[in-house]
Image: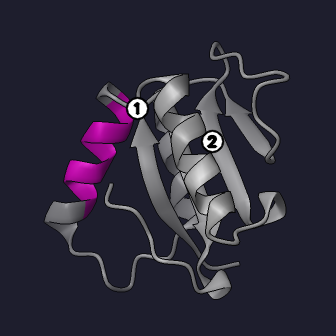
């Protein structure tokens, strides 16, 4: 499955706004995946598949498994990893095959 990072969010409100916008533009819940750290709770708030992991490094490993990086250079990946590990509680992924425009990370 070829996914793209739609966004890295630090609050549930910003995440919910992004999901609502994607759905408004035709994206289905099953086309998105949310990757979060285990201590973050989203039960009942988010109606998309959620993967919970135990720590930041595992979070980054999961993201790398879901997102193909052929177009990414090492500097961009390092910056993205830093953002995920230090600032992002919620990482929203979406299947590229759905053809929707990706939001900036």
Q: Is residue 32 left or right of residue 14?
A: right
Are the residues flagged by discs 2 and 1 in contact, CB closer than 8 Å? no
Q: How many marks?
A: 2
Q: Is residue 64 left or right of residue 23?
A: left
Task: Report x, y in % for residue 70.
Answer: 38, 85
Q: Is residue 76 left or right of residue 11?
A: left
Pick whichever, 21 or 80, lies toward us.
Answer: 21
Local SS, label 1: loop
The tag on residue 54 is none
Is residue 71 on the magenta stretch? no
* Residue on which the image places disc 2: 35
Task: Report x, y in % for residue 40.
Answer: 63, 17
Q: Is residue 62 visible?
A: no
The quarter of the image holding the N terminus is bottom right
Local SS, label 2: strand
Q: Is residue 51 left or right of residue 65?
A: right
The quarter of the image holding the C terminus is bottom left
């Amino acid at each position: 499955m070829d996914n793209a990072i739609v966004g890295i969010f630090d609050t549930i409100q910003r995440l919910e706004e992004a999901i609502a916008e994607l759905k408004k533009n035709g994206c289905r819940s099953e086309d998105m995946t949310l990757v979060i750290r285990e201590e973050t709770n989203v039960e009942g708030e988010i109606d998309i598949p959620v993967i919970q992991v135990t720590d930041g490094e595992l979070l980054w490993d999961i993201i790398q498994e879901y997102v193909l990086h052929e177009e990414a250079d090492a500097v961009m990946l390092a910056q993205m990893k830093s953002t995920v590990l230090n600032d992002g509680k919620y990482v929203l992924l979406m299947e590229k095959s759905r053809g929707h425009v990706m939001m900036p990370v």
